[in-house]
Amino acid sequence: MRLKSKLVLAITGLVFLVVFTLSWIFLGQLLRQRMSQAYSANDMVAHQIALATQRSLAASHYAGANDPKALRAAVAKELRTDPAVTELLNSAIRYAPTVFDVTIADSEGRGLLSTDPTNLDHLVPQRPEYAELESGGLLQLLKVVFGPPRVYNLTLPLERYNEPFATVRVGVRTTFLRFVVEPWLIAALMYTGVAILCSLIFAAFLANLALKPIEQIGARLDALALAEAEGTGEAAAGRSSDDAVVLVSHKIERIGRRMRNVEEVFSALKENLDQIMTNLQDGILLYTHDARAVLVSDSVERFLGISRAEILGAKLHEVFSRNTRLGRLVRESFDARMALVQEEITTETGRRVEISLDFIHDDRAVYPQETLGALLTLHDVESVREIESDLELSRRLAAIGRLTAGVGHEVKNPINAIVVHLELMRNKLGDADHRAMRHLEVIESEIQRLDRVVQTLVDFSRPVELQLKEQDLRRVVSAVLMLASAELETRDVHVESDLPDRPVMARVDSDLLKQALLNVVLNGAQAMAEGGNLKVRLAEDGRMALLSVHDQGGGIPDDVRDKIFDLYFTTKKDGSGIGLAMTYRIVELHNGSIEVESDTTHGTTFILRFPLNTQQESRARGYLMPDGTSSAGSIVAKEPRG
């Protein structure tokens, strides 16, 4: 069978399937509608009979009402002698087209009054409920209506003194339903058949009409496909069939293979380029000859304060304003076609930026001064210095870690030996000389203090196992503030917390993070000797969580600001110099960063940053020593913070 014939049959079959499905749904809805109408009519009959029964029984008083048999006999006699109830039952049989019989039964199911004499004073036959038909599918309804005759009950309960007393049962015979539904279904089937037949004819005609231009398409593709296939030997394969559709499909397949190869190369290049642009710290903007941006790195947002989506496609003069030094320099250089080579300027905010502008020329152009585009590079000079400062601080901590590990190992053994010999000396002296014992106690106390210092060094250099879990940073901050509330009150420090309304989720070790934040909060409170306000703020900054703690203390002098994270460095009389060093280490373990802003007039602000949506790498998955080595001794790669 030719492919063209297969396509015609496929389209025709699809149209037939759609029309048949719609017709089936229509028939189902029609049948359910007629069944529902029959249910409503029979339900109305049941309610009318129930109302007439209640009126008949309400007007009578029965002696021996406490005797169930006497009461039933009296009720049966009353209903059978009431002409209104009897006439109503006969009318239902006579005029309702779907009603087979009507029975009023007592609570035990025995007939009190019925249009079927065999039901009087006997148990009424059990029948399925009519309501079950409404929940059935179309096939089930068709089997019920057009299958063997059956009778369904529509039951309505009656109560006396809030207790079941009797039921009105209206029998509906399926043959009666068929007489009501059959004319509608026959008409619907006729219309459905006509619609399907017309659809098939129209689909066949439309398919043939639509597939005629395929030969013209093949003729137009033939020139391109044949020219490229001659060099690869594919021309003979294209002529192996006399079916025009087969020939066109072969040609399109060859073109498709070449397009897929080009697309795969392009996708790989684009993916690599996007990855490079994402990881770049410098801002990169590529412009066409008409000054329209076609390539923008993510870092540009930090320099211009404009989202990458707004810059893409916009012209250079729409992005850079003459009101700023950066914008004025870029616009003037671009208009004059003057290249910039690492031109350093200071923006209005005091930020130092290095600018490079290179123009792309086409050597084959008639006029060499014509450009294909321009490449603009923005380099943050201060960020490089900050990174160098952070690296220097990391090297210091690594050196401290190695030093503490060695000191802890070398000092622990002599301390243990001194303690042993001190205990032996105490035993030999006994209680002979109390003055000598006092000296021994002083020596023992100092040795214990020295042991605690050494133990602190060992603990600080010990590997830390992070227990990373999804945490709402708002709860962590609230827990720390509640924990520090007692000491803050004694120092007359008032906390102003600014937490966002929605959760700020991050994978962190909540215990370690609480310890780090508690160190910063208590450090800020201790900096305010006369009390004051301590501001704690949590916010989102791109893909990072920003947690800042600001105090109103006297600030940190410039000459010691670079040393505050060194182990055992402190400016307090009773300080240990461990808290901020531990805080820095915990932040580093979470791939975060910590910044300090301080002056003598406005106080000090500690800014802690943690990643929100990035997976933690090797440091967050296992053990990490302070010097950057894992517990197994191998070097652990450090991720860029922030």
Image: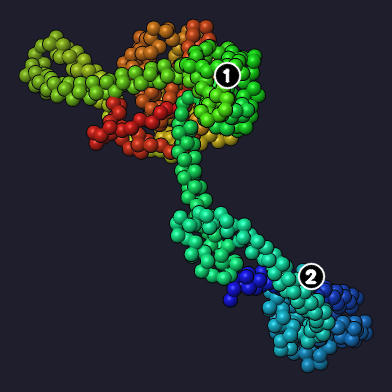
Is 591 placed left or right of 369 in the picture? left
- Front one among 171 and 420: 171
Q: Element at badge 2?
A: loop
Q: Amino acid at mark 2?
A: Tyr
Q: Position of residue 405 (x, y in %)?
A: 23, 25
For image coordinates 49% across by 40% down, the residue present is 270
10 Å neighbourhood of mark 2: few (<14), some, or many (≥20)?
Answer: few
Tag 1 residue? 337
Q: Amino acid at mark 1?
A: Arg
Q: Residue furthest bottom?
A: 118
Q: Quadrant of the C terminus?
A: top left
Q: Quadrant of residue 66?
A: bottom right
In this figure, what is the number of numbered marks? Answer: 2
Is 233 placed left or right of 249 in the picture? left
For image coordinates 82% across by 79% down, the residue present is 187
Q: Quadrant of the N terminus?
A: bottom right
Circle nearer the N terminus (1, 2): 2
For image coordinates 19% across by 13% down, the residue present is 442
For image coordinates 58% across by 62% down, the residue present is 248
Q: Position of residue 564 (x, y in %)?
A: 38, 15
Tag 2 residue? 161
Q: Quadrant of residue 332?
A: top right
